[in-house]
Image: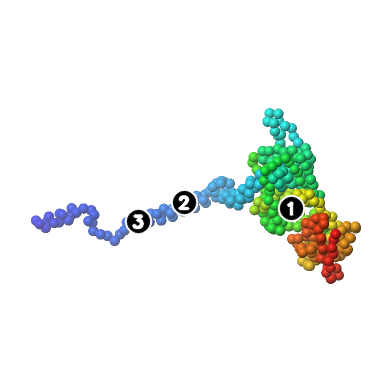
């Protein structure tokens, strides 16, 4: 009787006293791994289906626009920042009686100008058709032109408006702007709501179509890979500094280098004039790639010019001007155009293999 009761008690034991087993139930880790594998396979399948049957221009499948935005956005931000320093030059237009302001369209836009000084001096190309009847639009403000000055050497025109507190552009340095580097500009009028910007790369540092150069004319320009800017528009490097101004040379778009912009601005602010040197020459290094000491060969000094009176002869190789050695980055013209009336200038010249000094007064 006692044995039967014991047997019954064992039979009636709760389920958690079931005999142990070596088989383990599935864990949460196993379920997680399975979910990850299934999710990966589903995602891959969806991607293959999308690439095969859905249009390729859907934004969630085509990642190229996102990459493009991430690369160009810093340039757009920099260009937007410089909008306050860029003005539009417009033809005179009628004033709307109700609004009390001139109304412009794209056909009225002559070109652009960059702010040089806070008190109202701006610079543009002399190929922008300017007169004192033209209007300058900077942001929401419209100005009449008070004064116009030109620099025939560089092809720049400076205009003065009655303004104060303007934000000047920052002029960079030509020798810091290398071939292959990016430059950008504003393609539309600065007072437009939806702005369009253009980026290009520097293709040629010393661009000139003439073999015989002159110390009294622009000897080189900057050439971009793609060029479609508005006349007089400023091109900026990735730091936001101006590296050139849009111009045309023999009907081809080029940039006036910032080196010559700096010189011209200095003459404007100091109210000085450029010197006529009177030297025609061949630049062997920049025109033919020759690397040799005395890379500039004088073709012919102009009669009665300061160079001719100093004794410079055809065939002389000019090595340096004062302490500035002539090189591919420092041309004879760019060096001489830094001097002003009254400065002492000594040309270091190789003549028949002998080095001599020629002082130009």
Circle on res. 262: 1
Of 96 and 263, which appears nearest the observer? 263
Residue furthest toward the right? 303
> How is the protein colored in the picture?
rainbow
- Looking at the rendered image, the disc whose residue lies closer to the viewer, 3 or 1, is 1
What's the distance in space between the residues labelled 2 and 3, CA to CA? 23 Å
Which badge, 3 or 1, is on the more N-terminal residue?
3
Image quadrant occupied by the C terminus: bottom right
The answer to whether residue 288 shows anywhere in this view is no
Judged from the image, the secondary structure of the residue bearing numbered disc 1 is: helix
Please name the residue that numbered disc 2 is placed on. 42
Q: Are marks 2 and 1 in contact (CB under 8 Å)?
A: no
Q: Residue at x 87, y 58 (%)?
A: 306
Q: Between marks 2 and 1, how big is the CA–CA gap?
A: 62 Å
Instruction: Say which of 162 and 17 sits in front.
Output: 162
Residue carrying label 3: 27
Q: Position of residue 35 (x, y in %)?
A: 41, 53
**Sequence-wise, which precedes: disc 2 or disc 3?**
3
Q: Label 3 crowding class (10 Å Cα cut-off): few <14, some 14-19, many 20+?
A: few
Return the residue nearer the eye: 234 or 228: 234
Q: Say whether residue 233 is left or right of residue 3.
A: right
Q: Earlier in the sequence, mark 2 or mark 1?
A: 2
């Amino acid at each position: 009787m006692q044995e039967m009761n014991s047997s019954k008690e064992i039979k009636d034991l709760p389920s958690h006293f079931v005999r142990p087993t070596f088989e383990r139930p599935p864990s949460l880790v196993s379920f997680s791994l399975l979910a990850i594998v299934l999710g990966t396979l589903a995602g891959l399948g969806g991607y293959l289906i999308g690439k095969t049957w859905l249009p390729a221009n859907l934004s969630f499948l085509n990642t190229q626009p996102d990459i493009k935005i991430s690369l160009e956005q810093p340039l757009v931000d920099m260009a937007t920042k410089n909008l306050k320093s860029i003005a539009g030059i417009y033809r005179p237009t009628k004033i709307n009686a109700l609004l009390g302001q001139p109304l412009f369209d794209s056909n009225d836009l002559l070109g652009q100008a960059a702010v040089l000084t806070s008190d109202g001096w701006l610079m543009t190309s002399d190929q922008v058709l300017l007169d004192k009847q033209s209007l300058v639009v900077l942001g929401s403000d419209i100005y009449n032109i008070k004064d116009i000055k030109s620099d025939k050497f560089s092809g720049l025109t400076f205009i003065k408006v009655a303004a104060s507190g303007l934000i000047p552009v920052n002029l960079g340095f030509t020798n810091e702007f290398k071939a292959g580097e990016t430059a950008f500009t504003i393609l539309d009028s600065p007072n437009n709501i939806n702005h369009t910007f253009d980026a290009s790369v520097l293709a040629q540092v010393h661009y000139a179509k003439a073999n015989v150069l002159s110390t009294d004319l622009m000897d080189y320009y900057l050439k971009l890979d793609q060029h479609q800017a508005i006349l007089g528009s400023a091109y900026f490097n990735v730091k936001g500094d101006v590296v050139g101004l849009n111009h045309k040379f023999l009907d081809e778009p080029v940039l006036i280098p910032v080196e010559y912009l700096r010189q011209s601005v200095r003459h404007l602010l100091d109210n000085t004039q450029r010197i006529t040197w009177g030297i025609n020459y061949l630049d062997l290094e920049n025109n033919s790639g020759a690397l040799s000491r005395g890379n500039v060969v004088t073709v012919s000094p102009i009669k009665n010019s300061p160079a001719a009176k100093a004794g410079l002869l055809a065939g002389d190789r000019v090595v340096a001007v004062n302490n500035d050695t002539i090189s591919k980055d420092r041309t004879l013209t760019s060096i001489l155009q830094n001097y002003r009336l009254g400065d002492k200038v000594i040309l270091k010249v190789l003549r028949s293999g002998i080095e001599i000094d020629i002082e130009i007064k």
